Image (cartoon, rainbow, N blue to C red):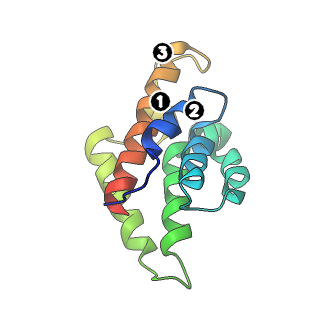
Amino acid sequence: MLHTKVDVTELACEYFNNGYSCSESVIKAFSDAGIVSEDLVGVATSFSGGMSSGCLCGAIAASQMVIGALHGKDKDNTARALAKEFVSRFKAEKQATCCKFLSAGYEFSSPERKTKCTELVRFCTEILKELL
């Protein structure tokens, strides 16, 4: 389990509720904790809102970026195993990884959707903390 001085879960939720997208907020929190490079925040931008098409949830995409940055090629190469475990845990609880499915029934800019997505950001960071 990941132990940091910074509570990445609360920080990610704070960022998400203050102007960062779901994907950016996950990366920014892990960057502020010194776990990944801040350069990934810009990379994460295009993954929010299911890559602006409702596909893969941006918080999941960012979580996969964190896993890859820490365990990918030229590191210990366990990224694929951790990625699979992350998705398995996520789907066991939420049934799907698609942004459209996860946010179905909510208007894009509604406070209700923001609350739902904050919970997804929280859930993703909790899974990451357990896996890393």
Question: Residue at horizontal 62%, vertical 18%?
Answer: 109
* Residue, far front: 5
Amino acid at dot 3: Glu
- Circle nearer the viewer, 3 or 2: 2
Amino acid at dot 2: Phe
- Circle nearer the viewer, 3 or 1: 1
Does any portion of residue 6 appear in the rendered image?
yes
Say if mark 3 contacts mark 1, CB within 8 Å: no
* Residue 108 horizontal/vertical position (percent): 60, 21
Whichever of labels 3 and 1 marks the residue nearer the N terminus, that label is 3
* Residue 121 placement, left or right of 45: left
Question: Residue at horizontal 38%, vertical 67%?
Answer: 82
Q: What is the distance, in whole Å, between disc 3 and disc 1 at their CAs?
A: 10 Å
Question: Residue at horizontal 56%, vertical 85%?
Answer: 74
Whichever of labels 3 and 2 marks the residue nearer the N terminus, that label is 2
Q: Which residue is mark 3?
A: 112
Question: Residue at horizontal 56%, vertical 59%?
Answer: 34
For label 1, the SS is helix
Quadrant for the C terminus in the image: bottom left
* Residue 19 placement, left or right of 96: right
Q: What is the distance, in whole Å, between disc 1 and disc 2 at their CAs?
A: 7 Å
User: Which picture quadrant has residue 69?
Assistant: bottom right
Q: Residues within 10 Å of mark 2 (few under 14, many from 20)?
A: many
**Disc sitting over residue 86 in the figure:** none
Q: Which residue is mark 2?
A: 16
Amino acid at dot 1: Thr
Q: Which residue is mark 1?
A: 118
For label 2, the SS is helix
**Is residue 44 or residue 93 the one in the foreground?**
44
Q: What is the distance, in whole Å, between disc 3 and disc 2 at their CAs?
A: 14 Å
